Image (spheres, rainbow, N blue to C red):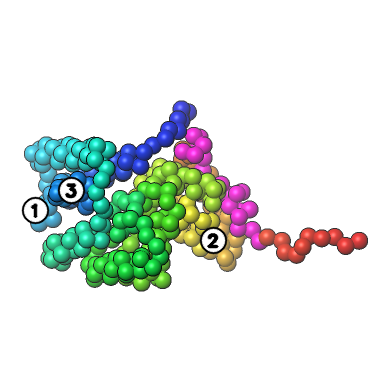
Amino acid sequence: ADYDLSLVTCQRLEALKDISFFLIHLGASMLMPTTFELFSSRKKGKGRAFRRIGKTPQSASPQSTAEDYISLGDQVASAMELIENYAASIVSSPGGSLTLIQDVKKYYDDEKNEIKKHGGNVSVTIITSVYPWGKKCGEAEMAGPCKDFVSLLNDFADLPVTFVFVVETTDVDVIKYYDELPSPESGIKADVKIAKGLGIMIDGARLYNPWLNYCLPMHLCQTLGICSNVLSQAASRPLSAAEIRVLCNTFIGDVPDPDVDLGAFLRTIDTFMSNDEHTKWNPATGKNAPLVDVEKLRMKLSPKPTGCGCIIA
């Protein structure tokens, strides 16, 4: 099919709303118990606002009645209204402070016993555009809050909780901070995944990994924490051969180790790309394209010639 693609300037707030609406509808369509909570109150004196979508874990049942679906529709409408009102309040009164550290701590204190009691896996998606402690500060001033945040996340290490931080900003320092959270050097033992906004991903992947068709289904997977830590890096730097293999194994199929046999690796990907299933609309070009451009990937991974390239006659 042909697509008429128009690229428009999008406010960060609109991007946050889009991700929120997607998660709201996902929770509803899967009948997945979901709590949507506004961690940070922008208007002084206003408490945290939240809406629950789906059944609570203790009342969950395989059977769903007509009343359940009606109630679910009301819950979705209420949650979307909450986001719209919150966005409007930010536009009309942009003051206030963001206190992600304090609110994640409160979430831990409020929910840890329930999580232990009912079991099951819990995914906590946090959409943010700033440091966990709010305002940017000097490196020396960051040391204390950074240590506190690592300690806080480690409180979740023994719980079946996965954090997905969706970073919606072009501030390179903030992006770098979140990019480094999943690394062993950060000292974080909890399950942490990083995702980035669609615009950031399209621009970054085109610059650093032009062989990759960063399509919309791939972006939805990243937002849900599927292969997020590799995908998010694709917008910040060229991926290594090992990371590319992880990506291919996740979205395409099992491929050989490129460090062992690069030719077999590329031939296997080429075979997969002949399947229409692996051709998707590319939002960067507005055209259908394979998930992987094998020739561009070959150029990236092939050994580079050594020496000065001089000819002595």
Asked whether 234 falls inside the magenta stretch, the response is: no
Residue 309 against residue 22 in the figure, above or below: below
At 9% across and 53% down in the image, what residue appears? Answer: 59
Which amino acid, by three-letter code, is at mark 1? Ser
Residue drawn at point x = 21 percent, y = 58 percent: 103
Q: Nearer the viewer, residue 10 or 57?
A: 10
The earlier-in-sequence mark between 2 and 1 is 1
The residue nearer to you, when weighing 138 against 165, is 138
Q: Which mark is residue 59?
A: 1
Lateral position of residue 271 relative to residue 43, left or right? right
Q: Is residue 285 magenta?
A: yes
For disc 2, the marked residue is 241
Query: Would you identify the image quadrant in which residue 139 lies?
Result: bottom left
Residue range (magenta): 283-303
Residue at image x 22%, y 47%?
42
User: What is the number of the mark on residue 44?
Assistant: 3
Relative image position of residue 207 (x, y in whole percent)? 54, 48
Please say whether residue 120 is visible from this viewpoint: no
Label 3, secondary structure: give it.
Answer: loop
Quarter of the C terminus within the rendering: bottom right
Q: Residues within 10 Å of mark 3 (few under 14, many from 20)?
A: few
Relative image position of residue 169 (x, y in whole percent): 39, 48
Asked if the residue at tag 1 contacts the one at tag 3, i.e. Cβ–Cβ closer than 8 Å, the answer is no
Check the image and name the residue furthest to the right: 313
For the residue pair 11 and 192, the one nearer the viewer reads as 11
Q: Who is closer to the viewer here, 207 or 224? A: 207
Q: Earlier in the sequence, mark 3 or mark 1?
A: 3
In three-dimensional space, the C-alpha distance between marks 2 and 1, rounded to whole angstroms, equals 46 Å
Q: Amino acid at mark 2?
A: Ala
- SS class of the residue under badge 2? helix
Question: In the shown orientation, is residue 55 left or right of residue 217?
Answer: left
